[in-house]
Image: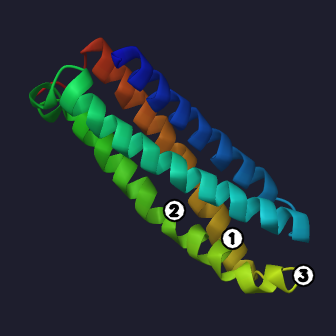
Amino acid sequence: MSILVAFLHHLAAFTLVSALLAEAVFIAQPITMSSARSLRFLDALYGMSATLILVIGVLRVMYFEKGADYYLHSHAFLFKMAVFAVVGLISIYPTVVFLRWGKTIKQNRIPALSGTELKNIRRVIRLELCGIVLIILNAVLMAKGTGFSG
């Protein structure tokens, strides 16, 4: 069972990264009806993947791996969780913008996106990707038991 839970955790993580990279590609191009719909779908997929990562991660910590005591004394784990929280919080901005597009898209109109909103969304996505790199680094440090142990 532990292997299945670990597999699902990794599958959700790869899905999250894929969705975010696809968002980065779509937001770098002019917004069309198709790309607006794709961005909304990808953002929902990103959110669902993040939720699954969190839920499955809690299950792994509590029941399937080394136990909560081990993880809660690992600086790498705590830093990883802090970065995950920050990435989650900054991801709210693009999500709100994409959700606002719902009515416009239903009316078959291309959503308006100001230059500032576009610039901010691109910046947030880049920051999210940088955060994911830090999360992966700390996951490796945790797995190897090096670096940041408490």
Choose between 18 and 130: the one closer to the eye: 18
Residue at 57% of width from left, 76% of height from top? Answer: 96
Q: Residue 120: x, y in percent? A: 62, 71
Distance from Cα at disc 2 to Cα at disc 1: 14 Å
Looking at the image, residue 138 lies above or below residue 55: above
The amino acid type of the residue labelled 1 equals Lys
Residue at 21% of width from left, 27% of height from top? Answer: 63
Residue at mark 2: 91
Name the secondary structure under disc 2: loop
Q: Residue 137: x, y in percent? A: 41, 28
- Does residue 32 appear in the picture of this structure? no
Query: Is disc 2 surrounded by few (<14), some (14 to 19) or many (20+) residues within 10 Å?
Result: some
The amino acid type of the residue labelled 3 equals Asn
Left/right of residue 17 with respect to residue 9 in the rendered view: right
Residue at mark 1: 119
Query: Depth-wise, is mark 1 or mark 3 nearer the camera?
Result: 3
Query: Is disc 1 surrounded by few (<14), some (14 to 19) or many (20+) residues within 10 Å?
Result: few
The quadrant the N terminus occupies is top left
Query: Is disc 3 surrounded by few (<14), some (14 to 19) or many (20+) residues within 10 Å?
Result: few
Residue at 44% of width from left, 50% of height from top? Answer: 51
Q: Which of marks 2 and 1 is nearer the N terminus?
A: 2
Query: Depth-wise, is mark 2 or mark 1 nearer the camera?
Result: 2
Q: Earlier in the sequence, mark 1 or mark 3?
A: 3
Q: Residue 136: x, y in percent? A: 45, 30
Residue at mark 3: 108
Number of marks present in the image shown: 3
